[in-house]
Image (cartoon, rainbow, N blue to C red):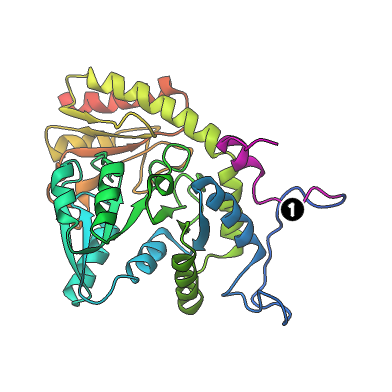
Amino acid sequence: MKAMHPSTQAVHLGRPPHQPDQPLNEPITMASVFQGGGDREYGRFSNPTWTAFEEALGTLEGGKCLAFASGMAAVVNVLDLVGLGAKVVAPRHCYNGTLAHLADLELRGRVQTTLVDITDTDSVVAACDDAALVWLESPTNPALEVADLDTIIKAAHDAGAHVVVDNTFATPLRQKPLELGADVVVHSATKYIAGHSDVLMGAVVTANDEIHGVLKGRRDLQGSTPGPFETWLALRGLRTLPVRLDRAESNARELAKRLREDPRVDEVRYPGFGAIVALVMPTAAKADLVQNNTKLWIYATSLGGVESTLERRRRWQIETASIPEGLVRLSVGIEDVEDLWADLDQALAQTLS
């Protein structure tokens, strides 16, 4: 049988074998300890429900996956691999939790951080010199900037650095960083992978057996493991990722087109794929009017669920100061696009009164 398409893999990977009386889905294994003599032993080391999820996501990304308790748990464990005082290059615009953790590590003398404009490829390449790790997001959160991953990954490796790509926004259905040469992929599985705003979970994927072994050892030691029920929900969500993302992306494209034609909006950012759109209003006050006056769109800080959410990102004090005060991030869901547009239109109308 020829290799399955990713949309088929998402449905079929991580299931029990095709044998009589086997369940179609991997059961939830609620266990803190296993009988001795095998590979599992203790609930901090392994769980069959994790294994099913890790098989599915790892195959989609082209590597070996480790499930973590949250996206930040995954981020922290990966950054913990950087040697004392080593240089980390990261986008000036990326997930504020990642930037906050890098700032904390720098404050404690653990790393030196160089923040770069990810759209200025020459500057990023230059910054790779003497770096131990290059951390990338593409598209970035919430600026939706797209990096030249091919060029930057090659330059980082030429400089002797490892490369990590946070693939949360794109998902492996739109971008496979390991195939481009990245060493590690990080996910907040809370977002598109689980997809229903009811799971807190993260994941790391690598094709490097040594990195995988070190990260698994740290996860086992630190206990940054997900619960089996959360993992089961994330795997269940992954099954429908292809259809959810197709619908949400189609909605996002249409909304971005309409918003770009709307004189009430100063700027629209959409990278051309995925389901995140950012609109920039003239002022923070007008952005708040949009955020606070929708009826269907939900004012919420997370993203990637079936429901549409929105948020003015600079309401968070830790958000990067170069993000416009009036930027509202839209996480476009799978509702009917006409309903989504009608709600945005009436909220935008509030900014004219």
Is residue 340 covered in magenta?
no
Name the residue carrying label 1: 16
Callout 1 amino acid: Pro
Q: Is residue 101 above or below residue 240?
A: below
Q: Decide if residue 171 is in sight here.
A: yes
Q: What stretch is highlighted in magenta?
A: 1-19
Q: Residue furthest front?
A: 158
Position of residue 88 measured from the top left corner of the image (x, y, whole percent): 22, 63
Could you tell me residue 302's position as x and y percent? 37, 48
Residue 353 in view, yes or no: no
Q: Where is residue 113 in the image (x, y as percent from the top left)?
A: 18, 64
Q: Is the magenta stretch mostly helix, strand or loop?
A: loop
Magenta span includes 12: yes
Residue nearer the viewer, 247 or 13:
13
Residue 152, given in percent of the width and then of the height, sits at: 25, 47
Residue at point 26%, 40% (across, down) = 148
Question: Quick check: 224 above or below 199?
Answer: below
Q: Quadrant of the C terminus?
A: top left
**So how many labels did they put on this image?**
1
Position of 207 with respect to 145 (left or right) is right
State left or right for residue 54 relative to residue 311: right
- Residue under the image location 56 percent in, 58 percent down: 230
User: Callout 1: helix, strand or loop?
Assistant: loop
* Category of crowding for the residue at label 1, using alpha-carbon neighbours closer than 10 angstroms: few (below 14), some (14–19), many (at least 20): some
Q: In this view, does 87 lie to the left or right of 51?
A: left
